[in-house]
Amino acid sequence: MSITAAIVLFAVIWFLVMLITLPVRLRTQGDEGEVVPGTHAGAPANFKLKRTMIIVTLITIVLWAIIAGIILSGWITVRDLDWANRLSDR
């Protein structure tokens, strides 16, 4: 795995984990009963971006290490995922 592939893998995992994590434990302004004029009732009431990003980064580091380890060890290769036999020798 090249350094570029490792960075791309990390970025993809980070954004997927971020999109999964955003709605977890979300309290909206409608839930709190204090809707700020000019905002939607579904807007977050007390969103902590820094804490969320730290949690997402820690989860991503663990997932990236597992996935990169599997890729580098050769447990799963591209040929294992070639169900249409397009990579077979002709």
Image: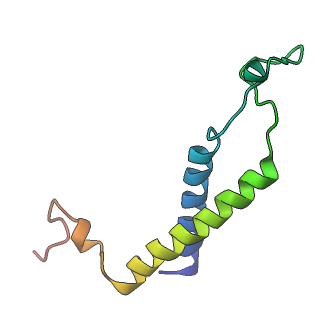
Determine whether, in the image, residue 70 is placed left or right of residue 47: left
Q: Residue at x 59, y 64 (%)?
A: 60
User: In which image quadrant can residue 47 be found?
Assistant: top right
Outermost residue on the left side: it is: 90
Q: Seen in the image, is 43 located left or right of residue 17?
A: right
Looking at the image, the residue that sits furthest to the bottom is 73
From the viewer's perspective, is 56 left or right of 39? left
**Protein image colouring:** rainbow
Residue drawn at the location 15% of the way across and 59% of the way down: 84
Q: What x and y, as percent, mark residue 17?
A: 57, 53
- Farthest residue to the front: give it: 32
Q: Establish if 12 lies above or below 72.
A: above
Q: Position of residue 40 (x, y in %)?
A: 77, 17
Residue 11: quarter of image? bottom right
**Residue positioned most to the top:** 37
> Residue 73: horizontal and vertical position, in percent?
37, 86
- The number of numbered discs placed on residues in the rendered structure image is 0
Q: Residue at x 65, y 39 (%)?
A: 25
| Figure quadrant of the C terminus | bottom left
Q: Position of residue 20 (x, y in %)?
A: 56, 45
Residue 26 sits in quarter: top right
Q: Nearer the viewer, residue 7 or 25?
A: 25
Depth check, front residue: 84 or 30: 30
- Quick check: 10 above or below 28? below
Position above or below: 23 against 75: above
Q: Residue at x 44, y 80 (%)?
A: 69
